[in-house]
Image (cartoon, grey):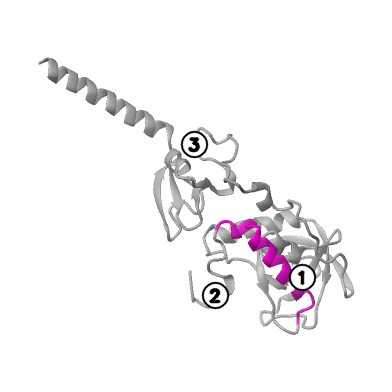
Amino acid sequence: MTLRRVGFAVLCVLSWLVASASAQSINVWVNTNSGVYHCPGTRYYGATKAGQFMPEEAARTAGFRPAYGQACGPARDAVRVPVASRDTSATTPGAPVADAGPNRPFRATASCTVTRVVDGDAIWCSGAGRIRLIGMDSPESDQGSFGAEATSALAAFIPVGTQVQIEQDVESRDRYGRLLAYIWRDGTLVNWRMVREGWAVLLTYPPNVQYVDWFAKAQSRAREEQRGLWREGGFACLPVEHRRHRCD
């Protein structure tokens, strides 16, 4: 009888511990490719091709970090999960870089005001219509969270309502009728900055090659420093290859 009572007490204690742990930890979706996890109710929760559900605390203990640096459970307002030996500020839009890109346009420019950020490499601008930023390429919207992160980065550089300068190259429009342009803001070439910060990769179609050397160096530095999406494996499948259905 005594052994039965002890066994029952132990079972009760274990059940209480499991229940307590479940109450304190939310099940998150871990993207095993990018190394980040997503909270319930968010766009990519349970939606990425590679991933699994697990308690948030277990995900954090295993080294996964919350998408956009925001925890899901009771620790939602806690500091971001640190990444060992890496400077997390390097992946924040607008974070300083050690080098600088072109400091002035080579050709004449025209002004317009940003009315919408479509994705990481396209915007709408008053008086100019839809603009495709050239010399660079960012992940598509169906490439998991990477497309959304690139869009957020571009929106941080040139928010809606920002006045920018448009500089064109040799060919003015693509086959979709979009204006092809370099975007300048306050003496900064935004196309270059997106590549340098790791939110876009080099993609150049001749004869629009005016800044190709700048972009090539920017990509090399961003990859070496693991900035932006390079740190998350966001370019394991390049956007252009994804559009050609050669990888996911």
What residue is pinned by disc 1?
A: 214
What residue is pinned by disc 3?
A: 73
Q: Is residue 199 visible?
A: no
CA separation in Å, label 1 and label 2 = 23 Å
**Is label 1 or label 3 in front?**
1
CA separation in Å, label 3 and label 2 = 37 Å
Which circle's residue, 3 or 2, is located before the other in the chain?
Answer: 3
Give the extent of the magenta segment: 208-232
Foreground residue among 173 and 203: 203
What residue is pinned by disc 2?
A: 241
Query: Which residue is depicted at the point 48% across and 72% down?
Result: 247
Q: Is residue 205 left or right of residue 46?
A: right
Foreground residue among 236 and 159: 236
Tag 3–tag 2 contact (CB < 8 Å): no
- Where residue 180 appears, x then y in whole percent? 75, 75
Amino acid on which the number 3 mark rests in the picture: Gly
Query: Which residue is depicted at the point 69% across and 63% down?
Result: 221
Q: Give the overall secondary structure of the magenta segment.
A: helix
- Where residue 212 appears, x then y in whole percent? 75, 75
